[in-house]
């Protein structure tokens, strides 16, 4: 794949230090990326996982090295810690190897639109909390990631492209979709109350571009399951892209927003049971 030239890029939920991190794909993305400003929108290094078990692959170190090299050659790199790297929030206002640490940020697009950038864990519903529901969700998520690793290994052996298994599972579970929609509404409402044009976040591992009553909700997804990022072109258009063995466009927000079926984006047969919002979303920007 050729160079990916853009004005700014947003990635989150990398979870370096865990076996599920697709560091190889991320390293390839960063190597091809040519941008002015890179936002690391939380959960880049999974300090929680590393505290439980020390696990580190050479590719993970290479990703860190690439980020530091980008900052050294003049790319503005802003690190906004999430809930899995929360201890780094104590370094807000400081720089690590040229990478600026902030609690959140206001990004002004090339078209003048203003977005708040944060990890997104502050929008977790009060009902989630530290309860058995959170524990059950973590167990289920680890099970999906475990299965995803094995499916990915098998597909590589069969010379098949990467398939994020969880996007199929989440798209078929009503409660998962309801949680995602509720989360998106809370994020959009907060941006509206702040008088902003939109919000860019991660956290829920579900990349999406959505206009919610005039407010643009942008989720850059993750590099554990979906290998996605948000990139902004020189005109201010925001695009959600997938990057693995191939590159796919998953959603775009300019004058018109189009979100194709995930099945089409990843080269699968159409999944007719996918919700209409995931099959094709067309909205008009204010």
Image: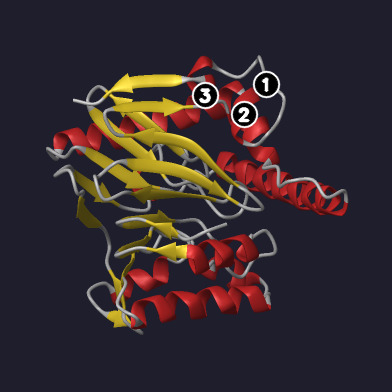
Q: Can residue 54 be seen in this view?
A: no
Tell which circle, 2 or 3, labels the residue nearer the N-terminal end.
2
Q: Confirm whether residue 248 shows in the render.
A: yes
Secondary structure under tag 2 reads helix
18 left or right of 90 in image: right
Q: What element carries label 1?
A: loop
x, y (%) of residue 140? 68, 42
Of helix, strand and loop, which one carries label 3?
A: helix
Residue 241: give x, y in percent of width and height: 49, 45
- Are the two marked residues, 2 and 3, in contact with CB atoms closer than 8 angstroms? no
Crowding near the residue tagged with mark 3, few <14, some 14–19, many ≥20 C-alpha atoms within 10 Å:
some
Q: In this view, does 147 lie to the left or right of 281?
A: right
Q: Mark 1 points at which residue?
A: 270
223, 7: nearer the viewer: 7
Neighbor class of circle 1 (other Cα within 10 Å; few <14, some 14-19, many 20+) is few
Q: Mark 2 points at which residue?
A: 264
Q: Which of marks 1 and 2 is nearer the N terminus?
A: 2
> N-terminal of the two: label 3 or label 1?
1
Residue underneath mark 3 = 278
Where is residue 196? Give x, y as percent.
16, 40
In the rendering, at what x and y percent does residue 163 appear?
70, 42
């Amino acid at each position: 794949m050729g160079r990916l030239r853009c004005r700014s890029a947003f990635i989150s939920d990398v979870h370096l230090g865990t076996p599920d991190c697709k560091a190889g794909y991320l390293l390839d993305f960063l190597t091809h990326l040519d941008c002015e400003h890179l936002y690391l929108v939380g959960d880049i290094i999974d300090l929680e996982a590393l505290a439980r078990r020390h696990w580190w692959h050479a590719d993970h170190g290479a990703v860190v090295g690439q980020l530091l090299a980008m900052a050294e050659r003049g790319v503005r790199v802003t690190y906004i810690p999430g809930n899995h790297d929360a201890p780094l929030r104590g370094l807000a206002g400081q720089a690590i190897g040229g990478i600026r640490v902030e609690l959140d940020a206001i990004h002004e697009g090339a078209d003048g639109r203003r977005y708040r950038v944060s990890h997104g864990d502050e929008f977790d519903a009060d009902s989630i909390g530290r309860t058995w529901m959170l524990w059950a969700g973590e167990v289920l998520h680890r099970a999906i990631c475990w299965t995803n690793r094995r499916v990915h290994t098998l597909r590589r052996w069969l010379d098949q492209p990467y398939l994020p298994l969880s996007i199929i599972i989440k798209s078929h579970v009503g409660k998962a979709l309801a949680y995602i929609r509720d989360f998106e509404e809370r994020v959009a409402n907060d941006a509206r109350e702040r008088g902003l044009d939109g919000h860019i976040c991660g956290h829920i591992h579900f990349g999406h571009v959505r206009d919610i009553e005039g407010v643009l909700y942008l989720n850059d997804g993750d590099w554990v399951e979906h290998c996605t990022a948000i990139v902004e072109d020189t005109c201010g258009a925001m695009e959600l892209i997938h990057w693995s063995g191939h590159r796919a466009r998953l959603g775009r927000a300019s004058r018109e927003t189009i979100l194709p079926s995930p099945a089409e984006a990843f080269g699968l047969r159409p999944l007719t049971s996918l919700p209409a919002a995931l099959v094709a979303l067309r909205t008009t920007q204010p």
